[in-house]
Image (tube, coloured by chain):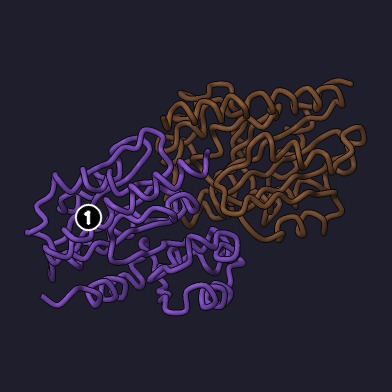
Chain colours: A brown, B purple
């Protein structure tokens, strides 16, 4: 009974996700699902990357959170349009929530749309939002065993942004271990080292995203 | 339809949780649900606390993970009995999983049982496992906005172990902000500052747990 219902929900989600994807493609929008644990630094990284992207393309953000509009306020403070989704305790975004948020955005006026998911290294993995790219933000403070321990999150991801790299000397984190485990799960995935706090690697992350835009 | 099913699942979970609680009480076991984000340092903290507890009481651990038996191996390496639950992708432990794991333990030979939940600051909050205490391990690297942003996790928690306190000088984390937000949600909750890595505060965490044991 549970399993049947779960399949039905996922089937419905996939239908809406395809619909979202069609709209993104038609408008030439690169939609990026930004995933990661609570506190991995997803919002901080967007705050750092958006001003760089802003000189080269038109970006917007959809923010997913259980509660508060804190993250949307942070994004708007850097001058980028943002729609906040509050899931009211829900553990992941789904395609329907994103479709509703899209109604508040003019896709024709956008090149890149970041969808910052709820901080959750488990449940967010299973829901296609219609995105073109999946990026997992992983903080070095979280430990180097996360790829092994949360395989669904890292399967089929396009890039891992290894954030808070400035903390590396103060941890036992081994970036090689992450790289090796990721190679097994997602051989094509890029790994970029970055610190939203010091700015190290932020330019390279911005370039990586710009390089994935569809030719118009 | 979804809501009805969710209620049914929670109802069934609560029944089993009550059953677990009855068994813990009958055996005089303090059961501690250890919650937190992926990489907050739950296992590392147990590795640090268990040798101290081991001199004063008999402890065991149930480890919840999506995949791998890494954490159970780490706990066994400090000489403490451990049962690994693999949720096969599931985002939280439930009371039934804990009941199964309890079958592999001799409760009569235990004083304290830690149940380390799946790394997840959302879904784990809703499932009573039959525990006597809830501890959230929050790493200072996760940022000081987590209590506001994940309120269900911090509602009714008995203690927050503010871990990786050695990283504090390298972050913008404000412990006062966490304290203030927690006071609003869970006025009775203790906050203990600790570093599993340096050992700072580990003794105080062990004492805090020992102080909550039931008089036999």
Q: Nearer the viewer, residue A214 or A67?
A: A67
Q: Which image quadrant: the N terminus of chain A?
A: top left
Residue shown at 52% from the left, 44% from the top: B3
Residue extending farthest right: A109
Residue B72: image quadrant is top left
What subunit carries mark 1? Answer: B
Residue shown at 87% from the left, 26% from the top: A27
Element carrying mark 1: helix
Residue shown at 71% from the left, 59% from the top: A69
Residue A103 x/y as whole percent: 83, 39
Left or right, A63 with respect to B70, comes to right
Residue A3 x/y as whole percent: 43, 28
Residue B149 x/y as whole percent: 60, 60
Left or right, B31 with respect to B36, comes to left
Q: To which residue does mark 1 refer?
A: B20
Residue A21 x/y as whole percent: 74, 25
Q: How many neighbours does mark 1 have within 10 angstroms: few (below 14), some (14-19), or many (20 or more)?
A: many
Q: Count of labels shown?
A: 1
Residue B41: image quadrant is bottom left
Q: Which of B134 and A80 is in front in this view?
A: B134
Q: Which image quadrant: the C terminus of chain A?
A: top right
């Amino acid at each position: 009974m549970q399993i049947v219902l779960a399949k039905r929900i996922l089937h419905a989600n996939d239908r809406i996700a395809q619909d979202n994807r069609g709209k993104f493609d038609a408008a030439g929008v690169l939609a990026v699902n930004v995933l990661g644990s609570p506190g991995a630094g997803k919002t901080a990284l967007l705050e750092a990357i958006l001003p760089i992207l802003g000189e080269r393309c038109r970006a917007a953000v959809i923010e997913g959170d259980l509660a508060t509009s804190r993250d949307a306020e942070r994004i708007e403070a850097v001058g980028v349009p943002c729609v906040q989704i509050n899931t009211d305790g829900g553990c992941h975004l789904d395609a329907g929530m994103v479709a509703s948020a899209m109604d508040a955005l003019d896709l024709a006026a956008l090149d890149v749309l970041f969808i910052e998911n709820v901080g959750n290294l488990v449940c967010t993995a299973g829901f296609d939002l219609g995105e073109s790219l999946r990026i997992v933000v992983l903080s070095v403070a979280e430990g180097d065993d996360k790829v092994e321990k949360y395989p669904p999150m890292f399967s089929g991801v396009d890039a891992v942004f290894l954030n808070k790299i400035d903390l590396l000397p103060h941890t036992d984190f081994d970036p090689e271990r992450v790289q090796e485990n990721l190679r097994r799960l997602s051989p094509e995935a890029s790994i970029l080292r970055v610190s939203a706090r010091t700015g190290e690697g932020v330019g390279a992350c911005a370039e990586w995203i710009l390089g994935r835009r569809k030719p118009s």
